[in-house]
Amino acid sequence: MPQPLTNYQQKQIVRKHSAYAMESKEGGYPDHRITQELLNKGLDREMARDVVSGLASAPSAQRDAARQAMWTGGLICLCGILVTLGTYGIAAANGGGVYLIAFGAILGGGYRFLRGLSKLP
């Protein structure tokens, strides 16, 4: 008799078949057909239902994650710009001197923002 799958193994199987199910859903296939295909691929009925039920929340979760990345990236970039302008302003007010260019925060935050923007559904 085969050993029952661990929770981790079940999640791995669901994750593996979720990409196929998502492509089928985007292709216009109805949920019952996707469920049947997953059953044909060897998933049990409960796992197939988990995969198909997760499809409804996937676009919302993807959109939320993309927006979160945009907010975080935008704030990091803005902080980098403010630090750069602030230190430059202090140096200029004192007749010159050393100031900080926070290019890591500016570039990293900008990259994160653009990456989030590109992942919006």
Image: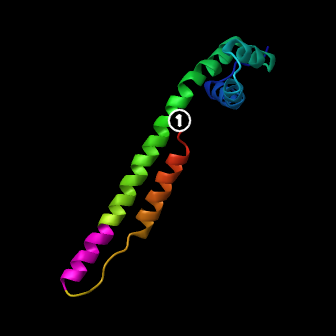
Q: Quadrant of the C terminus?
A: top right
Residue 112 screen position, x and y as percent = 48, 53
The reply to whether residue 10 is in sight is yes
41 or 72, nearer to the observer:
72
Query: Which of the 4 quarters of the picture holds residue 103?
Result: bottom left
121 or 20, nearer to the observer:
121
The outermost residue toward the left is 94
Check the image and tell me how it is coloured: rainbow
Determine whether 113 is above or below 15 in the image. Answer: below
- Of the residues shown, which amino acid type is indicated by label 1? Gln
Query: Which of the 4 quarters of the picture holds residue 38?
Result: top right
Q: Quadrant of the N terminus?
A: top right
Q: Which stretch is magenta?
A: 83-94
- Residue at 33% in and 60% down: 79
Q: Is residue 54 left or right of residue 94?
A: right
- Under tag 1, what secondary structure? helix
Residue 65 screen position, x and y as percent = 48, 39
- Residue at 50% in and 57% down: 111
Crowdedness near tag 1: few (<14), some (14–19) or many (≥20) residues, C-alpha within 10 Å: some
Determine whether 12 is above or below 65 in the image. Answer: above
The reply to whether residue 43 is in sight is no
Q: Which residue is mark 1?
A: 62
- Residue at 34% in and 65% down: 81
Q: Provide the major secondary structure of the magenta segment.
A: helix
Residue 70 screen position, x and y as percent = 44, 48
